[in-house]
Image (spheres, grey):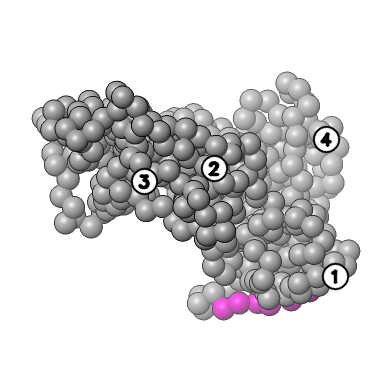
């Protein structure tokens, strides 16, 4: 057996005469995270269960804070409706459910701190076991705000200059929000702000800085940072405080034929990306005249860096080549080089891409139904490969409850003993007439779960131990 990148869950039954059911059941679709801007009438969450325990009478309940949503304390202006959904699968191994939440404006008047997790719980009639989805979080946009940004700045014509956005409380993930800047004339406080458009001389960085390759007199304006959040039914802007930029002249300033050497805004960096994912690279430079940006790709084992073919659909330049979106990343996407040049100087930034396979099953776990004999053993495996990290995080759950470590060899329950990646269950200390054990393997982007159901219908002959192992070599 190849020990690299494998996770195993072993079940060993000693001194038992019992019927054992091992079940592989998980949520193929989990509830999504959404942001609300306060004018939603309703939103709909969905989840979908996949199981090879067909005929077990599965049903799905929607939960929040360990309670059925219909048992939650009443919130003014919020009602729930649960419905089954058509999964498009004629067999009964896929079950879907939706949760519709109807809002009234009164709920958003309760203050900015509205953030609720919802998840699905699947139960069956054969062994009363439960399987849980990952949670989806509903967050009111009022939780997000700017703090700590300045009110005035000064710069000199011809100089490089950067405006910094201030701190943002609760920044949404990149797929939910982008930073932009807006500007208005400095001498007209009542005028409306409008978005600053990127140009070869001006760039808004991915982390929210506004960088001027060099300052001109017309840059004297009022500016404000904006975080533009993608909400459930549109976009919503969160504004920072306005910053007044004053531009002054100098006897040493650059005029007409002044030349300033090219300098890269970005440092060389190594990025990690999953195969078939997308990645945004950003490259900017300062200098006079304004530098022009170009890109090349140095494939793995290639002798040189090849100019990018922007006719290839997976390479998408934007913002005057200052941003490059790479789609469907593959193992040959080894080095991307951004180079900037003006009439008298040249500079470059190198992006090294560490391409990894997505965390996945080597072989998808399958259920077994058998009758064990004395000292018989059954193995339930969940081998994985790939992932963003060499050793993914492995966690254990029993009947949906996390088994927490309390120190080396000890857990939160006297029946469980965790040693390295092993979970040992003393079956004399727990009622095993109905138990599920879930192994959860996750990295920063992907979570895989495998659940085994066990029904022990006969009496325990003597002290026996079930040894479960979930390890990633």
Report the mark closest to the observer, 4 or 3.
Answer: 3
Secondary structure, mark 2, is: strand
Mark 2 is surrounded, within 10 Å at the Cα level, by few (under 14), some (14 to 19) or many (20 or more) other residues, namely many
Q: Earlier in the sequence, mark 2 or mark 1?
A: 1
Secondary structure, mark 3, is: helix
Q: Residue under label 1, please give it.
A: 76
* Secondary structure mainly formed by the magenta segment: strand
Secondary structure, mark 4, is: loop
Q: Residue under label 3, please give it.
A: 218
Report the mark closest to the observer, 2 or 1.
Answer: 2
How far apart marks 1 and 3 lie (CA) works out to 51 Å
Q: Earlier in the sequence, mark 3 or mark 2?
A: 3
Report the mark closest to the observer, 3 or 2.
Answer: 3
Q: Residue at x 80, y 39 (%)?
A: 427
Q: Residue at x 58, y 73 (%)?
A: 92
Q: Nearer the viewer, residue 192 or 168?
A: 192
Q: Residue at x 58, y 39 (%)?
A: 151
Q: Residue under label 4, please give it.
A: 413
Q: Residue under label 2, please give it.
A: 243
The quarter of the image holding the N terminus is top left
Magenta extent: 79-86
The picture quadrant where one finds residue 272 is top left
Mark 3 is surrounded, within 10 Å at the Cα level, by few (under 14), some (14 to 19) or many (20 or more) other residues, namely few
The picture quadrant where one finds residue 440 is top right
Q: Specify whether 191 is left or right of 462.
A: left
Q: Is residue 404 visible?
A: yes
């Amino acid at each position: 057996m190849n020990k690299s990148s494998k996770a195993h869950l072993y079940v060993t039954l000693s001194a038992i005469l019992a019927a054992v059911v091992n079940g592989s059941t998980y949520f193929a679709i989990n509830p999504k995270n959404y942001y609300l801007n306060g004018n939603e009438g309703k939103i709909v969450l969905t989840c979908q269960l996949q199981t090879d325990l067909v005929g077990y009478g599965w049903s799905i309940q929607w939960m929040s804070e360990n309670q059925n949503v219909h048992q939650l304390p009443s919130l003014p202006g919020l009602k729930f409706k649960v419905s089954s959904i058509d999964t498009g699968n004629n067999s009964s191994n896929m079950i879907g459910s939706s949760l519709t939440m109807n809002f009234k404006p009164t709920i958003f008047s309760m203050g900015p701190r509205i953030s609720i997790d919802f998840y699905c719980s699947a139960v069956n009639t054969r062994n009363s076991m439960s399987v849980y989805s990952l949670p989806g979080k509903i967050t009111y946009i009022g939780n997000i705000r700017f703090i700590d940004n300045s009110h005035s700045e000064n710069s000199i014509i011809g100089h490089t200059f950067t405006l910094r956005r201030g701190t943002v409380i609760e920044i949404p993930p990149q797929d939910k929000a982008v930073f932009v800047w807006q500007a208005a004339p400095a001498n007209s406080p009542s005028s409306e702000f409008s978005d600053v458009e990127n140009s070869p001389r001006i760039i808004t960085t991915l982390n929210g800085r506004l960088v001027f390759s060099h300052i001109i007199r017309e840059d004297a304006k009022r500016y404000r940072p904006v975080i533009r959040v993608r909400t459930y039914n549109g976009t919503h802007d969160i504004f920072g405080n306005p910053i007044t930029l004053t531009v002054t002249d100098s006897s040493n300033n650059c005029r007409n034929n002044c030349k300033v050497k090219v300098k890269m805004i970005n440092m060389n960096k190594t990025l990690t990306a999953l195969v078939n994912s997308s990645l945004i690279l950003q490259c900017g430079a300062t200098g006079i005249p304004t530098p022009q940006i170009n890109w090349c790709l140095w494939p793995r084992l290639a002798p040189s860096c090849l100019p990018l073919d922007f006719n290839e659909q997976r390479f998408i330049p934007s913002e005057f080549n200052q941003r490059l979106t790479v789609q469907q990343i593959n193992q040959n996407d080894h080095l991307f080089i951004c180079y900037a040049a003006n009439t008298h100087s040249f500079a470059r930034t190198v992006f090294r891409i560490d391409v990894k396979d997505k965390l996945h099953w080597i072989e998808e776990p399958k259920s077994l139904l058998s009758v064990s004999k004395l000292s018989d053993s059954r193995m339930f495996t969940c081998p994985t490969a790939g992932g963003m990290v060499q050793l993914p995080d492995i966690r254990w759950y029993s009947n949906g409850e996390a088994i927490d470590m309390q120190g080396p060899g000890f857990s939160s329950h006297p029946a469980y003993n965790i040693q390295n990646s092993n979970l040992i269950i003393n079956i004399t200390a727990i009622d095993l007439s109905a138990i599920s054990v879930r192994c959860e393997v996750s990295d920063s982007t992907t979570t895989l779960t495998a659940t085994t159901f066990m029904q022990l219908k006969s009496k325990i002959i003597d002290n026996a131990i079930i040894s479960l192992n979930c390890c990633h070599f």
